[in-house]
Each structure stands twice: as structure tokens, then as C-alpha cells.
Amino acid sequence: MSLFSRRDFLKLSGAALLATAFGRLDLAQADNTAPIIHHGSRNYPHVALTYDDCQLVTRLHMLEDILNQHPDAHTTLFPVGNALATVDAKDPGLWKRFYSKGHEFGYHSYYHDNLALYKPQKVVDDFDKWLDALTKVLGAQPTVHFARPPYDIISDPFMYACGQRGLVATLYSIGGGGPTDFVMNAIRKFQYGDIIQFHTREQPAIPSISQAESRDMTTTSQAIPFFDSVGVQCVTLSQLYDDVLRDQFNASGCDTGTGQSLTRTCLEP
């Protein structure tokens, strides 16, 4: 049984499916209708940890060390395109290590520009350039299902590109980036299916915070054990998305809840 392509993944989820599953859904019309998700299913003990920008090797090493201590936790990285080569030059194989351990990659633009200022086709071209850069550092072209716009700005050009390339526009339900105690307080009030946004970048210019430290990595080091303690698994966005499909179809024999998406056979009468 063959797995879905990016376009199949998007088409077969559909607007009605997502509206029911996510509770919050906006639509933009392009060649395909592209959904915007803020969280996954509320019925399964899963959350998604996501990391934007991914420009600093030091922060990525911190994240890698944390994840190595928790091999059952998986994340989704949203690196900007120009960071892919620069990070790989400083630590060849770093991206491959994340990928080989089951972590996922999503589109976050090539230069971290405001894509609302681009023409629609330019965003499509930007995605293709980003995907070429990712393919080069991984040594193989991965399947990419998710896209997060810089500055979290959902625009017509961005949504057009999502429709053209079969991408699910992804926001979040819990935002990191603040003091660890503040963010952990929000995390302790989580719901199943939450998407948590972190960054791997320098701290804001706050004198009391050392640039050698990372609030988001400190929070991550506390968040994963917390979720473990309450029986919640940190999963990729693909697996979180599969939970939605499982809600809707829940057919025996369907390859759902695994991050691989449904097979065609599951949807045939």
C-alpha cells in the first residue's frame, strides 16, 4: 500500500475534516485549499514541540543533548534556508543526526523575510529553494508537510504557496520564548494536541540573561520530563496530524497515529 504524497496528505484531510478536528481553521483558496492548524486532536496524549529558525549551532547542540537523553521524544524543526548550509559547515552531519533519529523538518522561509511582502509565485520559489537546501544537507529529499511563516504572519502569498506545494500552514497553541517559569506554567496547563513553539536563536537583549544560556532549551529540558510524568508523548507534527485522521476514520488496519498518514486503502469504500 502506497503512502500519501504531500498533495494527497492535504487533499484527503480536507476542509470539513480539519474544521471538525482542530476547532480553529481558516482557509485560503489556491489550486488546493490549504488549512491552518493551531493544535491537533484533543483525544490522544500527544503534544508537538517545534523549533523555529535553527540558526545557532550552540542552541542546536543543546537541543540535541536534551533529545539524546529522551530518545522517545520527537520534535519538528523549522530552520530557515540560509541556516541549513551555515550550520552544516560548522557541524557537518548535525541535520542528518536529527533526521536519522526521527525528528521532522518544516518550511520557515529561506531568509526569514516577511512573506506577506512577496508575490505569491516568489513564495513558491522560496519554498523550492529551501527544500533544495534541506535536501543537500540531508543527502536525500525528505517529505515536508508543514510550513510556518516568519513572524507567524499568515498572508495570501504564503497560503498560495501552501496550496501549490501541499503544505499545512502551522501556528501554535503555546508559545515559548519567555522566562522558563512563565512558559512552564503555561505548559502545565496544556491540553492534548497542543503545538508548542520554541526558537533556537540568541536571547533578547536582556542584561540579566547570558548569551551562553538559552531559556527555550532550559524550558525544553524541563518540559519533556514533565510530559513523561503525566503520560504524554512528544511527537512530530506528522504524528499529531495523524491523530486527527484517526479521529475521523479509526479504521482497523489503517496506519494511523504513526506519523506516516493513512494509506489509500483505508479511505476506499
Image: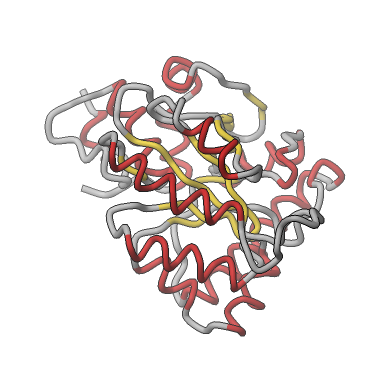
138 relative position to 82: left or right:
left
223 relative position to 225: left or right:
right
The image quarter in which residue 140 lies:
bottom left
Compared to residue 207, the image places residue 244 above or below, namely above
Compared to residue 216, the image places residue 66 above or below, namely below
Instruction: Give x and y (percent) for residue 131.
Output: 59, 63
How many marks overall? 0
Tell me which residue sits at (71%, 65%) in the image: 211
Compared to residue 71, the image places residue 8 above or below, namely above
Instruction: Give x and y (percent) for residue 112.
Output: 75, 56
Instruction: Give x and y (percent) for residue 125.
Output: 71, 57
Q: Nearer the viewer, residue 72 or 101?
A: 72
Instruction: Give x and y (percent) for residue 181.
Output: 56, 40
Tell me which residue sits at (58%, 66%) in the image: 59
Tell me which residue sits at (47%, 45%) in the image: 49
Tell me which residue sits at (65%, 58%) in the image: 53
The image quarter in which residue 117 lies:
top right
28 relative position to 97: left or right:
right
Q: Quarter of the image containing the C terminus?
A: top left
Q: Nearer the viewer, residue 97 or 142?
A: 97
